[in-house]
Amino acid sequence: MKHVLLFCGLFLGLSISAQNTIKPIAVEVYGSGDPVLLIPGFTVPGSGWEEVIAYLEPHFECHVVTLAGFGGLPAIEFPWLPKVNEALQEYIQVHNLTNLSLIGHSLGGTLALDLAARMPDRISQVISVDALPATGALYFPNFDPDALGYDSPYNNQQLALDATAFEAMAAQMAQGMSLKPEAQQRIKNWIVEADRKTYVYGYTDYLKFDVRESLKTIRIPVTILAADTPYGEAGVRQTYTTQYANLADYELVIATDAAHFVMYDQPEWFKTQLQRQLDF
């Protein structure tokens, strides 16, 4: 019995130790110059910025983030998003990044806004790509983050889907995220390859994430690069005006003929906007 307990204790210790070595983020660095931190959207690995990295690398030091549970990274314990957010702040501090530009897509844009509110002495500007400060408020009337939990019929259904059904769901979702079939395929693959629990429970974290109050403290330049599809320019302006009401000053630029992955649907337009905002 003692041997069994000793083995169990050793196994538990090894499990805890292994869990502690799994990080909420992984970062790859390219190029040299003023630092730029690129934060991808939900399920998207850092390699999703591939064209953007190639464009910026000759001019900037690009810190490219991948979030735990995505892009082949191991999953972490829940709640997932607060750990990711804390790890991003720690990374900026440990590597002493200053005059830092943040580029974030979707969830990455929301994280960038929150970091800008918390680290005004280190961050010089935010470029937010088709990102809202409170995505959950877009979907739920009388939005209450505390009402959203992991144990829900929708989440349980998502966890129970077999591989074929989940892939079909991912393919359907991807069709609305880009106008280009090749990009839709990449997006679908990222969803399918994601750790399933991180995909399901992590999205709950995402919907609960609300940084609208934090916008009041941001005083650095914020540029929002938004897509006109599927809501049209008027609908997009109305949504962004409502969501960003607490931000004193920002520039909203809307890409035509582009869905959520703006950088894939209008790559040259996107590069032009980066060049203009990063001034190179």
Image (cartoon, helix red, strand yellow):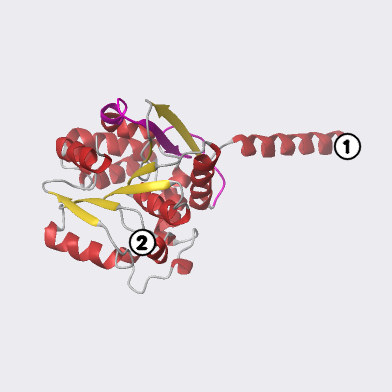
* Residue 133 percent coordinates (x, y): 35, 59
**Which one is in front, 254 or 160?**
254
Q: Give me the residue at 45% from left, 46% from top.
A: 122
**Which one is in front, 90 or 186?**
90
* Residue 203 percent coordinates (x, y): 41, 52
Q: CA distance from mark 1 to mark 2?
A: 52 Å
From the image, which quarter does the N terminus lie in?
Answer: top right
The local secondary structure at tag 2 comes to loop
Quarter of the image holding residue 29? top left
**Which one is in front, 238 or 201?**
238
Q: The disc labelled 1 sits on which kind of residue?
A: Lys
**Which one is in front, 3 or 204?**
204
Q: Which residue is mark 2?
A: 134
Q: Which residue is mark 1?
A: 2
What count of labels does the image hold? Answer: 2
Q: Give me the residue at 44% from left, 29% from top.
A: 28
Quarter of the image holding residue 57? top left
* Residue 139 percent coordinates (x, y): 31, 64
Which range of residues does the magenta coloring cover? 53-78
Q: Which mark is residue 184?
A: none
